[in-house]
Image (tube, rainbow, N blue to C red):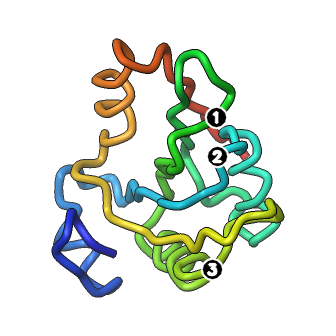
Amino acid sequence: FSRGSTPMLPQQIIAADDSQNDGEVTILLRHIACKYDQNDVKRILDEYGFQGKVSYISVPRKARSRSNLGYAFIRFRSEQYALECYRVCSGQKFGPAATAKKCSMEISASQAGARELAQYRKEFYGSPQILICND
């Protein structure tokens, strides 16, 4: 994982993500196909074996378009699940879309990163949607 341009080893995730003690970790998954929404991301994660391991997913979208901004926030229920996702997704194409994009992952700036960024971007891109995962 990396925060901004500073590379970090996946094992450093806990040290970087100390904003809450609930054990959950929010990551930023970059370079996803622009056609995916949060339901698509959840379906793909479920196919990769992450069903029941995710608390919420946010895929910011452009206000007047069906296109996303090329990234998703995913909150995993544990650091171990986030590390598993790193091993499965990092450097690989995410899902079945016809794209050459290879995923990269970063630790979110804070546990509430998706909600904070979604609120900030709301005025520019319209209301974001967050998929709460109850499985």
Q: Say which element carries label 3.
A: loop
Splitting the image into 4 quarters, where does residue 100 fall? bottom right
Q: Where is residue 83 in the image (x, y as percent from the top left)?
A: 47, 78
Q: Which of marks 1 and 3 is in front?
A: 1
Q: What element carries label 2?
A: loop
What residue is shown with label 1? 67
Q: Is residue 123 left or right of residue 51?
A: left
Q: Which amino acid does label 2 sit on?
A: Cys
Contact (Cβ within 8 Å) of mark 2 with mark 1: yes
Residue 107 at x, y percent in the picture: 32, 63
Tell me which label, 2 or 1, sits earlier in the chain: 2
Residue at which label 3 appears:
92
As shown in the figure, which amino acid type bears the numbered disc 3?
Gln
Task: Tell me, for residue 34, which label it has, or none.
Answer: 2
Closest to the observer, 94 or 26:
94
Find residue 29 and report its horizontal and vertical position in percent: 49, 60
Q: In this view, does 8 lie above or below 100?
A: below
Is residue 102 shown left or right of residue 111?
right
Measured Cα–Cα span from mark 2 to mark 1: 5 Å
Q: Report which quarter residue 15 is drawn in.
A: bottom left
Count neighbours of disc 3 (C-alpha within 10 A) and say few if under 14, some if 14 to 19, many if 20 or more.
some
Per the image, label 1 sits on a secondary structure element best described as: loop
> Tag on residue 123?
none
For residue 9, side relative to residue 79 (left or right) = left
